Amino acid sequence: MSAIAVPSPVPSPSDDAEGIRKALQGWRADKEALVRILARRTAAQRSAIRRAYAFLFREPLLNSFRQRLSRQYCPVTVDFWKAIILWTMDPAERDANLVHGALRRRGDGDHLAVLVEVSCASDPDHLVAVRRAYRSLFGCSVEEDLASCPALQQPLRKMLVSLVSSYRYGGDRVDADVAKLEASQLSEAVRKKQPHHDEVVRILSTRSKPQLRATFRRYREDHGTDIVDDIDSRCSSQFARTLKSAVWCLTSPEKHFAEMIRESVVGLGTYEDMLTRVVVSRAEVDMEQIKEEYRARFKTTVTCDVVDDTSFGYKDILLALVGCEEE
Amino acid sequence: MSAIAVPSPVPSPSDDAEGIRKALQGWRADKEALVRILARRTAAQRSAIRRAYAFLFREPLLNSFRQRLSRQYCPVTVDFWKAIILWTMDPAERDANLVHGALRRRGDGDHLAVLVEVSCASDPDHLVAVRRAYRSLFGCSVEEDLASCPALQQPLRKMLVSLVSSYRYGGDRVDADVAKLEASQLSEAVRKKQPHHDEVVRILSTRSKPQLRATFRRYREDHGTDIVDDIDSRCSSQFARTLKSAVWCLTSPEKHFAEMIRESVVGLGTYEDMLTRVVVSRAEVDMEQIKEEYRARFKTTVTCDVVDDTSFGYKDILLALVGCEEE
């Protein structure tokens, strides 16, 4: 469920484009106006604004934002512009850029989260759109870059290639016999501390999300524990941690994203790129569920944690995308 | 290059739909009229005819054909209707049906050819369209059915899943260093009689077609032999034969399809399903190149072999789709 508040009636794309142009004039951009306009428009409306802006001012809107970003030195302002750029992008291009960035960052644990999120927490058709965008932006396929990425070891690399190459059935049909069989295959692999078993990868990367939900439910019924808890308690490799994220992203993404937000704000400092990525990419998808999960799990609200850990315009765009939340 | 001869001016879709309806009336359908109309229309024109027919006669065109097919006992007439149905289908749905049929036929060597052809000889966007069609027709993904197909053994199954899941870069960009490195990786695997090596599957299932062409060229330059000849002479498993088809389908599909046509007509009897599939699926793609290859390799023409091995309406539709060919 989307958390963004679109005004009614919504201004025309040309009016919005002109509002944005005005906000960009002068030495200091009017960040408040930018948030007021952009954070309250759906992906389709932002796309229309990009077209109107390019038509009216003979310049891509994202270029205007990138120019601003390139002149910033203050970290908070940099974070603001990065968030505005990610939010204004076409969602498939945004995810293609995130994946490309993740494949170029080495040794950073968060890059695995990006790959799993885009592969598993997306609608199957969105994932195909991301792969198409990646091909046209970077001149090769995602799976090609992933399969030859030196920072990723086997069997992790193989699982990620399978996950990103999936085009899962999108309907609700579930086969109870398959759920029973595959729950026992998963259980055997996890209990033998072989989370990287071929069958685990096959099940996770080909079955539909409702089928996987049925399989994990069956796992709980037959073995008395949740598969994620079993992975957590029995396997400790990076592969197992990535598998756990994949299970969550596939069947209850709000759990994964609530954990990501929490991880980005707790302790000293804030992982802004992680926080921005999660808020921007889930604002129109399941932010309401993420906020509920966050409240139930961490006994505080996303809003409170964002207010505590961020400031100025960066805080404003995040709060607008997180949406209303009672204390 | 397409082999079909579209008349100019082309009749309207409604006129064609009415012509087809007329041809279907009476005890014996007018096969000649059906071939005259349908075999001379492009995929887009056939799609418009399907829509016009459904609008005018409140019945899907394919249903009318299937009803006719269900009443046939004479094998030649059955082959005619099967060919007409495959040709009239939307190309992505046709390929989805062919793959689905292949996954249900067990122990038949030809089913592997279908899977390789659809995965490797298609344009990457067509392959995505086939996967989409498969999901809506059969309620699960291609890779899901493939990965759990009991008739396919490992490592063959794994390679086929990777090939069908690919969404290759469609541009012309080629990296000479990658070609050099991967030519030597391929050569090492083939020389060690390990065609199923992970790196072979990775290269074949992720690289773009121009990149693979460069790699195989480099292979020839560095090792003095063609990779297909090396696979042929050093490896003899079903995996190796499938790998050879994949190499051909990816870089010179005319070689694979010429061989398929030849295989379907030589010796006693004709493999009609194979012949129909190849002629129907390549008529609008590369039939001209297939005919050239056939003539160079087998010292005869596709037309001659089709005329010798088929009869009546079935022969007519095949010849119309094969197109003009000098003796």
Image (cartoon, coloured by chain):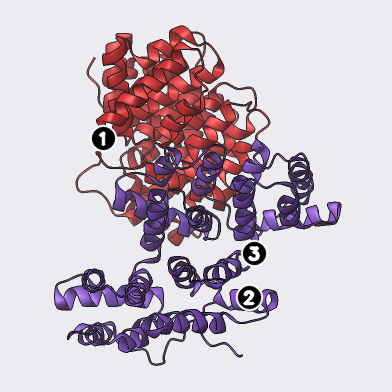
Chain colours: A red, B purple
Q: Return the mark for residue A174.
A: 1
Instruction: Give whichever of A60, A188 is nearer the camera.
Output: A188
Give the x, y percent position of residue A231.
44, 13
Mark-to-mark CA distance, 1 and 3: 40 Å
Give left or right: position of B311 versus B213: left
Residue at left offset 25%, top offset 41% = A6
Residue highlighted by disc 2: B294
The kind of residue tagged 3 is Ser
Rendering quarter of residue B203: top right
Question: At numbered mark 2, what does the secondary structure look like: helix, strand or loop?
Answer: helix
Question: At numbered mark 1, what does the secondary structure look like: helix, strand or loop?
Answer: loop
The kind of residue tagged 1 is Val
**Residue B265, above or below A171:** below
**Residue A198, above or below A195:** below
User: Number of callouts in the render?
Assistant: 3
**Classed neighbour count for the residue bearing mark 2: other residues with Cα under 10 Å, few (<14), some (14–19), many (≥20):** many
Q: Return the mark for residue A22.
A: none
Residue highlighted by disc 3: B252
Chain assignment, label 2:
B
